[in-house]
Amino acid sequence: MKDSIITYQTWAPDETLWTPWVKPVLFANAPRSTGSPVTIPRLKWVTSVERDTIFILDLPGKTGVEAGLAFAQLGYRPIPLYNGVQNKDSKSMIVDVKGIAAALFEGANILKSCYIRPTAPPVFLLDFNRLVKTGKRPGMYDNRWCIFPQDMPSATFLKQHGIRRVVVYSERIQEDLAHILCRYQKEGIDIYLCNDSSAMMKVNVKKPSQYKGLFYRIMVISGLTRNAAGGFGGMVPEPQASSGYHYRAG
């Protein structure tokens, strides 16, 4: 428990402007070392902090944490948004978050060594595999999750702190993220998309299905499995079984 608290505080220090958005879910239990070291990638397309720009790294598995640490070494503040619970039986998880959790803990010492200003612009970390379409069946641990507009700062908050540009580092913009980016775009914040094989490119984010719909959040959550302790995660019951935290499959 002590290791979990210390690691969480490393990623979410009290004096940092963006700490309120850090998700605590994967810090609940210190994982055993996977024996796989954290590998910090070289950022060829970012060389310094641009104070009017934030990044959203929507990358698969632990690669998002590793890229976030690379940004931290430049002076950006990495903000983990991972909200899928880790099950003790890793083989039963629909979304394998074991590597992400291990990277957060193993990367904490690297993060401690980085000089990051309290007001440094953030780099938000997402798992590209958070909403996989396959694998849900009885006996599996459904820890699929998604991001909602309430999970990130509002456009007003960003503009108040000098943010004028959002860069998404991913192969594409996923639908749940589009609900947030469209709000930013409407308020005059420019959206860019970048991946390893292309330069930063300004994009026009199309409105996703149910954009600003009254029942959008309810509809999405009804297809996932909410965990009573926070985040998303719960066993998919057998046909004859019942679960207090299970929601209709989407």
Image (tube, rainbow, N blue to C red):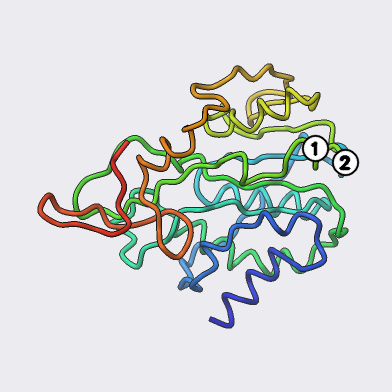
Residue 28: numbered disc: none
Of 50 and 84, the residue lying toward us? 84
Q: Residues within 10 Å of mark 1 (few under 14, many from 20)?
A: few
- The percent position of residue 2, horizontal first and vertical second, equals 58, 83
SS at circle 1: helix
Left or right, 114 with reference to 225: right
Distance between mark 1 and mark 2 Cα atoms: 6 Å
- The percent position of residue 22, horizontal first and vertical second, equals 65, 57
| Residue furthest left as drawn | 240
SS at circle 2: helix
| Residue furthest front as drawn | 214
Left or right, 161 with reference to 111: right
| Residue at left offset 49%, top offset 42% | 146
Q: Are marks 1 and 2 in contact (CB under 8 Å)?
A: yes
Residue under pointer 1: 156
- The percent position of residue 197, horizontal first and vertical second, equals 63, 26
| Residue at left offset 14%, top offset 57% | 241
Within the image, what quadrant is residue 132 found in? top left
Amino acid at the residue labelled 1: Thr
Left or right, 74 with reference to 102: right
* Quarter of the rendering occupied by the C terminus: top left
Determine whether 50 is above or below 82 in the image.
Answer: above
Within the image, what quadrant is residue 170 found in? top right
- The percent position of residue 247, horizontal first and vertical second, equals 31, 47
Q: Residues within 10 Å of mark 2 (few under 14, many from 20)?
A: few
Amino acid at the residue labelled 2: Gln
| Residue at left offset 66%, top offset 53% | 40
Residue under pointer 2: 160
